[in-house]
Amino acid sequence: MPVYIKEGVFEPFKEVQQYQQQLEADIGKGRYGASTVFVGSMRDFNEEHDVSAMTLEYYPGMTESALEAISNEAKQKWPVLDTLIVHRVGDILPNDSIVLVAVWSAHRAAAYDANRYIMEALKSRAPFWKKETTVKGGKWVEKNTLA
Amino acid sequence: MPVYIKEGVFEPFKEVQQYQQQLEADIGKGRYGASTVFVGSMRDFNEEHDVSAMTLEYYPGMTESALEAISNEAKQKWPVLDTLIVHRVGDILPNDSIVLVAVWSAHRAAAYDANRYIMEALKSRAPFWKKETTVKGGKWVEKNTLA
Amino acid sequence: MSISVKFFARLREELNMDEAQLEHVTGLTALQVWQKITGQPALPPKTLIAVNQEYASEDIVINDNDEVAFFPPVTGG
Amino acid sequence: MSISVKFFARLREELNMDEAQLEHVTGLTALQVWQKITGQPALPPKTLIAVNQEYASEDIVINDNDEVAFFPPVTGG
């Protein structure tokens, strides 16, 4: 159930593929039947202003433990074999991946439900803060998108 | 909204990554904020018997158009930028990927909902048939898993 | 008048037939096509029918050059 | 008695302070820690509080060596 905070650009689907190879080596092949991946990435538009870049601040220590707690909650609520969370921090450009959530399960309903649960919990509880750079200067994002 | 039927092994996350590069080249970077991927793969156990292999039969022509129709339905129901469906046919071994559904959208709710809609519709309507190879011989799967 | 008939999966194996042509018939329903080709009065329970690659019911009337397919419940994904 | 106090994001910028130490105080609530450090009577609306990296309310009593953090609503993901 690892959680990674990354300062630099990451390739979400490469991360998933590499992690999954390790997972198969650890638990054996053919153990899961369903995996879900969510990737949130930076768009180049948000509300009224064009956003040219973004900075993501976090709370070292608390952010990781919040994400670990969320992963464990998902594992208690659904029959999940494993999860992976990667979240970017620092300076981010449009089209960069910001967050990756992956879930492996024997069944697809659990894989979908747990993935979405983790994302919603992350959005509402994990200490990250976005500051957008627009033509008008820096602007803290005040409210998270509900969906 | 492409649909691919594949006879041989495929790497789902490599497929997604390659397709996404093409998508970004076509529609421009920073256009989507959320992508979801579902991968269904073969487990080495199913109900009572150990399954050592599987054969997936399909209806050339109808299968593709059923999947295209399902993709279009998802695009009409949710603000989806693009979708990708890959489904394996022929001889399949445990741990092989069977199906990949990817959805790109500006918003995460649409990306989750549309992905799940496509998978449920595929399971109930797309003409594919599984025959499992167990120690007792070949056995057609009679009923699809609900989840 | 020629109708192309296809069978898939368990039905294909049980009938030992994957494709058949029905000639010189007109106004048949899908069920009647099944009866003529297989000699069986009824479709096995839960059998699905597609006409020209779209789902249809057993009372649909088949036209010249139509493709009719019979198959068990689908189990992909 | 020493309390470590942290500020993040917009609060960090507005207060021009990312970290502070509060010495020789005892029995303070999180709100009183905020008042002592910032000189402001109330927390800005929607401000979140974490004590030892877990969410807490403003009336929680702070102990020796605790880490208290104040920050705006989170906006990750």
Image (cartoon, coloured by chain):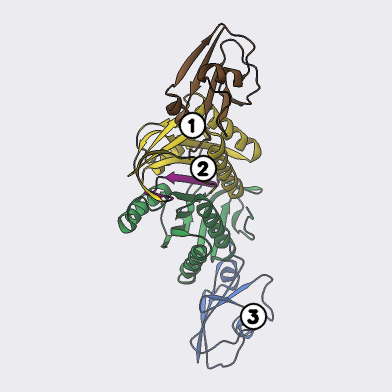
Chain colours: A yellow, B green, C blue, D brown
Is the C-beta separation of discs 3 and 1 under 8 Å? no
Find the magenta span and give its range.
Answer: A33-47
Percent coordinates x, y for residue B91 in the rendering: 47, 56
Tag shown at residue C58? 3
Q: Is residue B31 visible?
A: yes
Mark 1 residue crowding within 10 angstroms, few (<14) / some (14–19) / many (20+):
some
Q: Is residue A39 above or below residue C60?
A: above
Q: SS at mark 1?
A: strand
Reply yes or no: does residue A34 show up in magenta: yes
Q: SS at mark 3?
A: loop
Q: Chain of mark 3?
A: C
Q: Nearer the viewer, residue D69 or A38?
A: D69
- Disc 1 with disc 2 on a shared chain: yes
Is the C-beta separation of discs 1 and 2 under 8 Å? no
Label 3 vs label 1, nearer the camera: 1
Left/right placement of residue A82 relative to residue D9 reads right
Q: Amino acid at mark 3?
A: Glu
Residue that numbered label 1 is attached to: A3
Q: Amino acid at mark 2?
A: Asn
Q: Is residue B89 visible?
A: no
Percent coordinates x, y for residue A69 in the rendering: 58, 30
Q: Amino acid at mark 1?
A: Val
Reply yes or no: does residue B109 show up in magenta: no
Residue that numbered label 2 is attached to: A144
Mark 2 residue crowding within 10 angstroms, few (<14) / some (14–19) / many (20+):
some
- Residue at x-position 60% and y-position 32%: A72
Q: Chain of mark 2?
A: A
